[in-house]
Image (cartoon, rainbow, N blue to C red):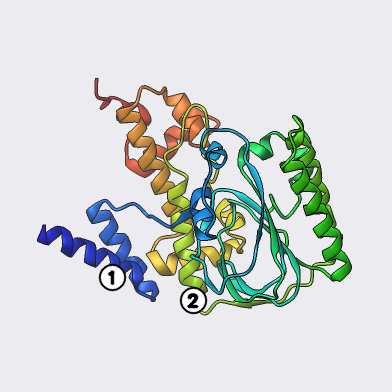
Amino acid sequence: MKEVRQCERQHETLRNQSTLESIKRYLIFAERFHIRNTFMIENLLQFYKRIHRESTNDQLVHYKGEEFYDIIRARCSEGKTTFSYRDFYKVSLVKSQGKLYYADRWILIDRPAIMFSSPLVPYAWEGIKSNGDDGRFLIFNEMFVRGDHNRASLSETPLFDPKMERVYFIDDAEVASIDSLFDKMEEVIHSDYSGKADELRCYLHLLIHEAMRVKAISSYEPHNNAAKRIAELFLALLDRQFPVDIPDKKLVLSTANDYADRLNVHVNHLNRVVKGATGKTTTQLINERIAQESSQLLQHSSLSIGEIAFGMGFEENSSFSKFMKKQTGKTPTELRSKLVQ
């Protein structure tokens, strides 16, 4: 028990260090004690608890593969939320003052704005001052998005493109127009109309385009600890990709460019901070993790080599074989010979 407590204390100490050197030490420690990266992902029930709203059975459909959507009125609470990913989408009409933090920068929200957030981009919000008026939030899950037959038209919008601006400041007339859309969506949600999910998706399209018609003028400031935060986010995002649910799904992020796009930073900058934090390049860490997961599947699953190769992002078995030989010194066939019968 003494060793376990000492282990836990060392774990927390290393996690809370403010220098890049701590990340190096944490990686060694985590590998030694088999600790997986546990960067926070806020789920829907945690969100409701944080804003002091009770969860209902309707909210539990979020975890049953069913559509979920809701509209919330809330005033700004002072204080800062945890920097994290969310497993839901949110479109916010912000009427209070605060700071919005991303991986390497932050922006002051000092007037009404529309803000888009999605599971793709982590962030934190720090409430500074309530202006006495309720903000409005439309929240929904991935199944709600999948039910949209016109979802392809949303691919180049702030909800689904991490490279796009996600904050749009609006004037009083635009606030009134957006408020009106939220009023209509609220009526739809509380109605017993059988097609209300489709109607709500139509309003979502309108809401997005109302915001995008506004010229985005945002002034961001860099973080003092941006390099450390980006390195931590990369490691957390890498960890989130696994295990891959083969054959139903395949690896989504497999290159340094993929991760840079998702974190909304330049790939060269990502490579610099990751190399400085871990001593390894972004590509090395990605390839090592792919090889590790592939080896486990080859030795401890009944999936075919072809299924594993495709699931890990390889179109050809020969490419997968060369990759594994380079990373592990063994071909997939040689690793498969260790399969537990």
Q: Residues within 10 Å of mark 2 (few under 14, many from 20)?
A: some
Q: Name which quarter of the figure residue 5 lies in.
A: bottom left
Percent position (x, y) of residue 95?
Answer: 72, 69
Q: Name which quarter of the figure residue 148 lies in.
A: top right
The residue closer to the viewer here, 306 or 97, is 97
Give the CA distance from mark 1 to mark 2. 18 Å
Local secondary structure at mark 2: loop
- Residue 148: numbered disc: none
Above or below residue 210? Residue 105 is below
Say if mark 1 contacts mark 2, CB within 8 Å.
no
Which numbered mark, 1 or 2, is in the foreground of this view?
A: 1
- Which of the two labelled residues, at mark 1 and mark 2, occupies the earlier sequence position? 1
Local secondary structure at mark 1: helix
The residue closer to the viewer here, 150 or 30, is 150
Q: Name which quarter of the figure residue 202 lies in.
A: top right
Quarter of the image for the N terminus: give it. bottom left
Percent position (x, y) of residue 242?
Answer: 43, 42
Above or below residue 271? Residue 330 is above
Point 42% across, 53% down: residue: 285
Above or below residue 273? Residue 256 is above
Point 57% across, 64% down: residue: 268
Quarter of the image for the C terminus: give it. top left
The type of residue carrying mark 2 is: Asn
Left or right of residue 332, residue 31 in this image: left
The residue closer to the viewer here, 176 or 274, is 176
Residue that numbered label 2 is attached to: 225
For the question of whether residue 212 can be seen, the reply is no
The type of residue carrying mark 1 is: Thr
Q: Residue furthest top?
A: 341
For the question of whether residue 117 can be seen, the reply is yes
Residue that numbered label 1 is attached to: 13
Percent position (x, y) of residue 302?
Answer: 36, 22
